[in-house]
Image (cartoon, grey):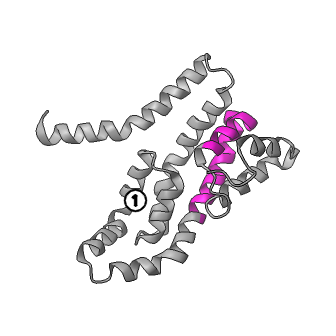
Amino acid sequence: MWAPGLGPAELKAMINDSGATGPLIFIVLCALKPILFFLPSLGLTVIAGTVFGPFYGTIYVAIGGAGSTAVAFYFARFFGRGSVEKLISGRKTLVEIDEKMATDGFKTVFMLRLFNIPWDLVSYSAGISAIGFKEFYLSSLILLIPSSFIFTYFGSKIGDPLSPGFILALFLIVAMGSVPFIVKRVRRWQKTGE
């Protein structure tokens, strides 16, 4: 959901009209979006490609995304962690899940990022869990730049849907979206041999 009065076209126009401060405005919007605007990460990334091109767009998205990851995590940690601890207290299964996030959170967050679960949702969820910030943040950053580049490159080619670059970017996006199904199929095959 876009913020009131700040749709994709308006955001793009605002950044274009900002001149040299456009990249800074974009980075700040990205970093603060989890708590102020609730803008979709994908939409911002595609806009970055159309406005800044694939190279600079990826840089600005990565910087803003790194900021938004921390902002969403600490927002959820500050406002939600205490309530979660009270909720799970005395509930063995929930406590075990929470402890698993503390001990195996790096892998869990990495897989959620790989499976293209909405970026802020993963950050909020990690913030209310027992995972440490360092493990969460490093796990998030591993996929931040490659995924940012793919979607930013897609945005830079969106005006020319018949170009090889657009087709390649679209193929990579579909391939990324297929990861959960491929992993599920491989796990099933390993268990059943089918």
Q: Secondary structure at mark 1?
A: helix
Residue 84 picture quarter: bottom left
In which image quadrant can residue 34 be found? Answer: bottom right
- Residue at image location 68% in from the left, 36% down from the top: 49
- The answer to whether residue 138 is visible is no
Residue 38 seen in render: yes
Rendered view: 180 above or below 131: above
Give the number of marks.
1
Disc 1: which residue: 106
Q: Amino acid at mark 1?
A: Phe
Quick check: is 54 in the magenta stretch? yes
Residue 70 coordinates in the image, percent (x, y): 58, 63
Give residue 15's quadrant in the image.
Answer: top right
Q: Position of residue 100 (x, y in %)?
A: 31, 67
Q: Is residue 171 left or right of residue 105?
A: right
| Residue 130 x %, y % | 40, 72
Q: Is residue 38 shown above or below 149?
A: below
**Magenta stretch, residue numbers:** 43-71
- SS assignment for the magenta stretch, majority: helix
Outermost residue, front side: 4
